């Protein structure tokens, strides 16, 4: 299961599994986003390097116009992946509170 | 538990279903699932992306041991490619120097507890373990 879409309060929600099979769908959605991009990852269960690639490509594109991607409500095990890959130094990340 | 999968990223959903069933059957801690899923996905995608000269399915076998999971992935009729050789990824590089791609095998080597590679008769066999004591 994977879903990505706009939410009223938190920007864009990303739910389920962002793996190699779902990366194309995620990239197609994020390619249309302009300006500051806040991704609510509270529903993200899993991310692989394919998903990391989607985030990185989007972040680089938006940073070029002075914006970027902010990751919020990041769960502990997803944060571990960001840390191992050095993404914690590239993105503004707000961890989930529980 | 043992199953063969077609050489397509679309098979990931079936691999996840197998992993889920295995964890349920063996009553393994859910915390290990993400590491096992990630390692299998990265290795599987690497096989189907780069070993394009074969149409043989990829075989995945999962075995429980006292504190974790052992996974054996077998790719037949392929050239030698050892994924356990560490490739340098500069995770401290600034954003402008980072490119999508190249992180998959790096993450596998970082997250699994042991990994080995054997190549014989044009068959690649990768064996890795994820230990509950390290990840729970």
Image (tube, coloured by chain):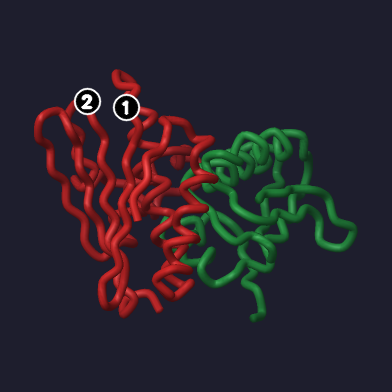
Nearest the viewer among A50 and B128 is B128
Residue at image coords 51%, 61%: A88
User: Which of the image's four quarters has the C terminus of chain B?
Assistant: bottom left
Mark 2 or mark 1, which is nearer the start of the sequence? 1
Label 1: which residue? B56
Which residue is outermost to the left? B120
Q: In this view, does B90 lie above or below B53?
A: below
Label 2: which residue? B77
Nearest the viewer among B10 and B87 is B10
Direction from residue B110 to residue B96 in the image, left or right: right
List x then y, in percent, for residue B58. 33, 37
Label 1 to label 2: alpha-carbon separation: 7 Å
Q: What color does chain A have in the rendering?
A: green
Q: Is residue A33 above or below residue B1?
A: above
List x then y, in percent, for residue A64. 65, 38
List x then y, in percent, for residue A21. 56, 39
List x then y, in percent, for residue B61. 31, 51
Q: In which quarter of the image is residue B59?
A: top left
Q: What element carries label 2?
A: loop
Nearest the viewer among A4 and A64 is A4
User: Which of the image's four quarters has the N terminus of chain B?
Assistant: bottom left
Q: What color does chain B have in the rendering?
A: red
Q: How many numbered marks have been drawn onto this rendered protein structure?
A: 2
For the residues bearing labels 1 and 2, Cβ distance under 8 angstroms: yes
Q: Do labels 1 and 2 share a chain?
A: yes
Direction from residue B26 to residue B14 in the image, left or right: right
- The local crowd at label 2, few if under 14, some if 14 to 19, many if 20 or more residues have their Cα within 10 Å, is some
């Amino acid at each position: 299961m994977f879903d990505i879409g706009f939410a009223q309060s938190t920007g864009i929600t990303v739910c389920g599994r962002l793996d190699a099979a779902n990366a194309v769908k995620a990239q197609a959605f994020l390619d249309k986003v302009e300006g500051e991009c806040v991704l609510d990852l509270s529903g993200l269960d899993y991310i692989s390097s394919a998903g990391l690639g989607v985030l990185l490509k989007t972040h680089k594109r938006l940073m070029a116009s002075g914006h970027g991607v902010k990751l919020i409500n990041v769960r502990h095990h997803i944060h571990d992946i960001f840390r191992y890959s050095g993404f914690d130094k590239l993105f503004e990340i707000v961890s989930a509170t529980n | 538990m043992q199953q063969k999968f077609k050489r397509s990223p679309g098979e990931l959903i079936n691999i996840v279903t197998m992993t889920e069933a295995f964890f349920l059957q063996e009553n393994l801690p859910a915390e290990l699932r993400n590491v096992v899923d990630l390692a299998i996905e990265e290795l599987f995608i690497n096989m189907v992306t780069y070993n394009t000269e074969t149409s043989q399915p990829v075989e995945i076998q999962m075995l429980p041991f006292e504190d974790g999971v052992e996974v054996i992935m077998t790719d037949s009729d392929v050239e030698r490619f050892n994924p356990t050789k560490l490739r340098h990824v500069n995770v401290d590089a600034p954003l402008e120097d980072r490119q999508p791609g190249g992180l998959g095998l790096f993450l596998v080597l970082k997250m699994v507890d042991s990994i080995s590679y054997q190549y014989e008769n044009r068959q690649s066999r990768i064996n890795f373990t994820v230990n509950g004591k390290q990840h729970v």
